[in-house]
Amino acid sequence: QVQLVESGGGLVQAGGSLRLSCAASGSIFRVNAMGWYRQAPGKQRELVATITNGGKTNYADSVKGRFTISRDNAKNTVYLQMNSLKPEDTAVYYCNSKVVQNVYEYDYWGQGTQVTVSS
């Protein structure tokens, strides 16, 4: 079994910054891609950013230039630095990791962390 533990959410004013962290632990052979998704009330979950274990990144257009995803492969941890936050960034943010166990890759999700941006 694999656990993803997220931290770093909270309440911030527009224009402020937050840093999210997500650490994967448990029965892990290798962690492939890691990423962040978010879900606002009444909306579908959407991709925010992903990063491969080689460091290749991908961002949603709405966060490009404001958010930075990074990872520490030795710690199986992914980070999301969020700058210039806007009220529309308010959502529950979920960490996702694609974990190789034995020979198969499995999708794991964190429990979610609330990010609220006030105007």
Image (cartoon, helix red, strand yellow):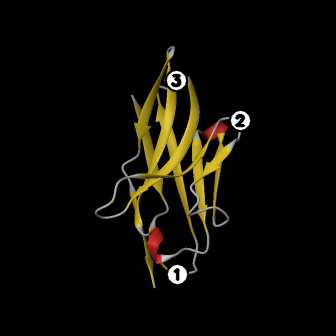
Asked which quadrant contains residue 3, the reply is top left
Amino acid under disc 1: Ala
Amino acid under disc 3: Val
Relative to 43, is 79 on the left or the right?
right
Residue occupied by mark 3: 100
Mark 2 and mark 3 lie on one chain; the one further toward the N terminus is 2
| Residue at figure coordinates x 35%, y 54% from the top left | 44
Mark 1 and mark 3 lie on one chain; the one further toward the N terminus is 1
Residue occupied by mark 1: 14
For this orientation, the residue located farthest to the top is 103
User: In the rendered image, which quarter contains the N terminus?
Assistant: top left
x, y percent for residue 81: 61, 62
Measured in 3D between alpha carbons, the distance from the residue under mark 2 to the one under mark 3, in whole angstroms, is 15 Å
Disc 1 residue crowd, few under 14, some 14–19, many 20+, Cα 10 Å: some
x, y percent for residue 72: 66, 43
| Residue at figure coordinates x 47%, y 57% from the top left | 7
